[in-house]
Amino acid sequence: QVQLQESGPGLVKPSGTLSLTCTVCGDSITYDNWWSWVRQPPGRGLEWIGEISHGGTTKYNPSLKSRVTISIDKSKNQFSLRLTSVTAADTAVYYCVRVLTAFQGFPNWGQGTLVTVS
Amino acid sequence: QTVVTQEPSLTVSPGGTVTLTCASSTGAVTSDYSPNWFQQKPGQTPRALVYSTSNKHSWTPARFSGSLLGGKAALTLSNVQPEDEAAYYCLLYYGDSWVFGGGTKLTVL
């Protein structure tokens, strides 16, 4: 069974950089899938942040593209999110998600981690 | 800025049928948008229900079905159960990015 677990600071100062890591168990990050980040501000809806392929190709939300970097560490079976110049509007629960290739869905989600910008 | 629109809220009686829709600001939704649907209950992680318009995951109850309807993606719940009360989100693909709808709060009453 595939499991994903987010980790990283729960508090980031305004204008600082948010950095999160997702550790994947039960699947190799080098297999033919995509790995995504989704966030949800408190009491609000879901927002797709971006994703990275097993080969390192990235896609980003146009509204966040200038501040986001998603990277992959095959040796640790992890992928990471970096969001710069954060403001209070970036306060959210951040989820890492496994995306199956060939548009077969977003079946596996981490439990989510709350990051507060303050 | 692409906008994906869902009904903010819907109410259905137990045992009834309800259809949630997902519209795109760019025009009619087709299978090329690879519509996905997710269910999220309060305090829980989103759970994937449907992918690529109408395909169900192994855990998706049979009473959930996805389709295209009148230029929109649609999720129909039949024989609605009390445990179906939740927020439902659609997700559409735009070539190099995905966009979530704002979500529909479904009340079973």
Image (cartoon, rainbow, N blue to C red):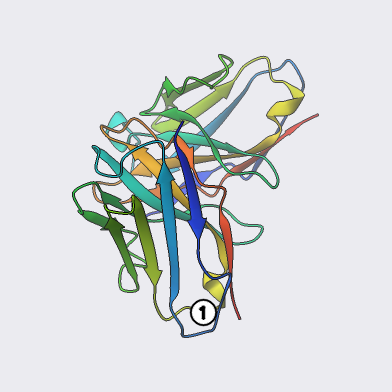
At x 69%, y 20%, the residue is B80
Amino acid bearing label 1: Thr
Q: Chain of mark 1?
A: A
Quadrant where the C terminus of chain B lies?
top right
Q: Position of residue A73 (x, y in %)?
A: 29, 57
Q: Nearer the viewer, residue A99 or A63?
A: A99
Q: Is residue B92 left or right of residue B82?
A: left
> Residue B4's x, y, as percent?
44, 48
Q: Is residue B64 above or below residue A113?
A: above
Residue at screen point 76% across, 25% down: B82
Whether residue A112 is situated above or below residue A26 in the rendered picture: below
Q: For the residue labelled by badge 1, is the local secondary structure a helix, a strand or a loop?
A: loop
**Residue drawn at (31%, 37%), measured in percent from left and top?**
B33
Q: Taking A71 as reference, is B106 above or below it?
A: above
Q: Quadrant of residue A106?
A: top left
Q: Nearer the viewer, residue A1 or B109?
A: A1
Using the rendered view, name the quadrant where residue B10 is placed.
top right
The local crowd at label 1, few if under 14, some if 14 to 19, many if 20 or more residues have their Cα within 10 Å, is some
Q: Quadrant of residue B85?
A: top right
**Badge 1 is on which residue?**
A87
